[in-house]
Amino acid sequence: MNDFLISPLLFACGLVALLSVPLIMRWVPVNGLFGVRTRRTVRCIDNWYRANHFGGWAILIGSLISAILLVLIPMAGEISKPAYIALFAVPELLAATVALAYTYRLPTPPQDNPHGAQIEDLIAQAYPVHEHTHSDEGH
């Protein structure tokens, strides 16, 4: 067994599982860094918490599946380094895909949703995008 590779991957499974807990518990407010961010989730607080609750569970389950595979599959015989990485990455990516797909089942927020505009404004203020423009002044 490649303990030098399996230990960090199991640690990563545990870390991802821990990071899913705040999402499951609905502790993560709308933000620009952490959570399931789509147009439907950032425009509606209810959608945000529903999607992140579901996504947190999906990611937790993906982490558990990854950990189980990382322990059980190598017992059947030696596997390659890329196979170890796939045993970690594939369940996690599938979980993230399921979480993202779930957002399309959420109701579309109305365009005139005042909360949605406020949320987007708060995110824009917290994480500004700096555009580079060239001025013709002085030429």
Image (tube, rainbow, N blue to C red):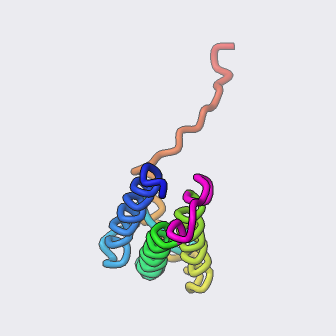
Where in the figure is residue 9, as x and y percent of width and height?
A: 45, 57
Q: Quadrant of residue 90?
A: bottom right
Q: Is residue 35 visible?
A: yes
Asked if 25 appears above or below 80 in the picture, the reply is: below
Say which of 94 and 69 sits in front: 69
Identify the residue at horizontal 49%, vertical 66% (top origin).
70
**Residue drawn at (65%, 26%) of the image:** 134
Q: Main secondary structure of the magenta part?
A: helix
- Comparing 134 with 5, the one in front is 5
Quarter occupied by the C terminus? top right
Instruction: Provide the residue span drawn in magenta.
Output: 73-84
On whether residue 42 falls in the magenta region, the answer is no
Q: Is residue 136 above or below residue 108?
A: above
Tell which of 137 and 100 is nearer to you.
Answer: 100
Residue 115 seen from this side: no
Name the residue rendered at 33%, 73% in the picture.
21
Residue occupying image coordinates x 41% and y 61%? 10
Coordinates of residue 74 in the picture (x, y in percent): 52, 66
Location of residue 119 by image quarter: bottom left
**In the depicted view, which residue is nearer to us: 52 or 46?**
52
Is 75 contained in the magenta span? yes
Percent coordinates x, y for residue 96 in the rendering? 55, 70
